[in-house]
Amino acid sequence: MSASELLPKSDDQIWKIYHTTEHVEHAQYWQARIADLTVQSQLIEVEKINNKFLKFNPDLALMVDEDGLWLTANGMKMQPAWQDEVPRLKRANPKNELIARACQIKPQLNPTIKIIDATAGLGHDSLLMASLGAEVILLERHPILFALLESAKKQAETHDYLVNISQRITVIHQDSAQYLTEIAQDQADVIYLDPMFPARDHNQKSEKKQAQVKKQMQLLHLLLPEDGEMDLGDALLNLAKAKVKRVIVKRPKHAAFLDGQTPDHQWQGDAIRFDAYFQN
Ligand SMILES: C[S@@+](CC[C@H](N)C(=O)[O-])C[C@H]1O[C@@H](n2cnc3c(N)ncnc32)[C@H](O)[C@@H]1O
């Protein structure tokens, strides 16, 4: 089945939210929450949600269990899974993380550095930046991705290691182009952009991590537009440059510059790089 056959296309399309009896209240919560975001859904109570169930219900849908909200399709399920990032967060150190150097995140900085992540996605970069000490506002325009992020934040609030980090994270459902147009100048220290890029390269990940990323990406691509119609985020660069002194853009290592604009500085990693644009 192709991605476009699975994807609920029009606004009046109804998302299924699968749940078991014990999670009916959570499912009702998420139904009401996505209704606020103008997404219609229907609750479907089932006896058991396991691999077999997901395999026999391959359409793109949502699912609620004790771990929060999930996106499901083609026998797979996916969520931002911030708890799985904990080992990575524990290893991270502001001195050797390129993202920390690019965004100038330093430990015990007072006042805390404020970052707007204008292309939140699964929120993994923001989670890392928050764990290194930054205060991060995540903007995500896709309602389902936003709901998944909100669920990830809720889960983080009850997680021993993530609870403090989650307090430095705010998630907002809005198009960044609108948000960046409306905010006052210097409301943040840094604006961070990681727009979609066709055929992203994840070769730098370990095998286990790669499998997980692959699953997350496969399901993510069912939600987001196909390569040809993808919004590559070029317009966000000038909007961001007009509002803060430091804009950082994450790119695959050999990708063209965002909006064709040559950066003022670069930090190169094995598979990705960070391009910096400074305004005086
Ligand atoms: C490549 S993903 C970002 C991945 C993210 N850095 C992470 O660590 O998970 C890009 C995301 O930006 C979102 N996005 C793109 N343009 C946007 C815009 N103008 N406003 C809000 N979100 C946007 C897309 O919906 C997508 O979820």
Image (cartoon, rainbow, N blue to C red):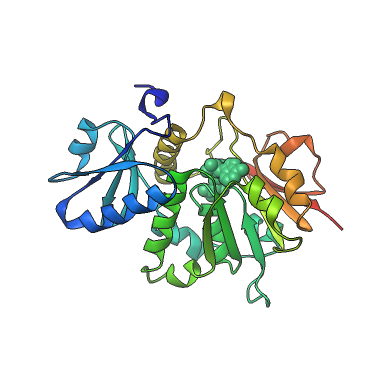
Q: Residue at x 71, y 50 (%)?
A: 181
Q: Residue furthest right?
A: 280
* Residue 95 shows up from this direction: no
182 vs 224, left or right, is right
| Residue in front for this viewpoint, 133 or 242 | 242
| Residue in front for this viewpoint, 236 or 132 | 236
28 vs 189, left or right, is left
Q: Position of residue 28 (x, y in %)?
A: 27, 54
26 vs 268, left or right, is left
Q: Residue at x 74, y 47 (%)?
A: 239
| Screen quadrant of the C terminus | bottom right
Q: Position of residue 5 (x, y in %)?
A: 37, 23
Q: Position of residue 155 (x, y in %)?
A: 37, 62
74 in relation to 41, above or below: above
Q: Residue at x 62, y 50 (%)?
A: 118
Q: Residue furthest left?
A: 47
Image quarter of residue 254: top right
280 in relation to 268, above or below: below
| Residue in front for this viewpoint, 62 or 112 | 62
| Screen quadrant of the N terminus | top left
94 in relation to 146, above or below: below
Q: Residue at x 38, y 31 (%)?
A: 8
- Quarter of the image where ligand 1 sits: top right
206 in relation to 14, above or below: below
123 vs 247, left or right, is left
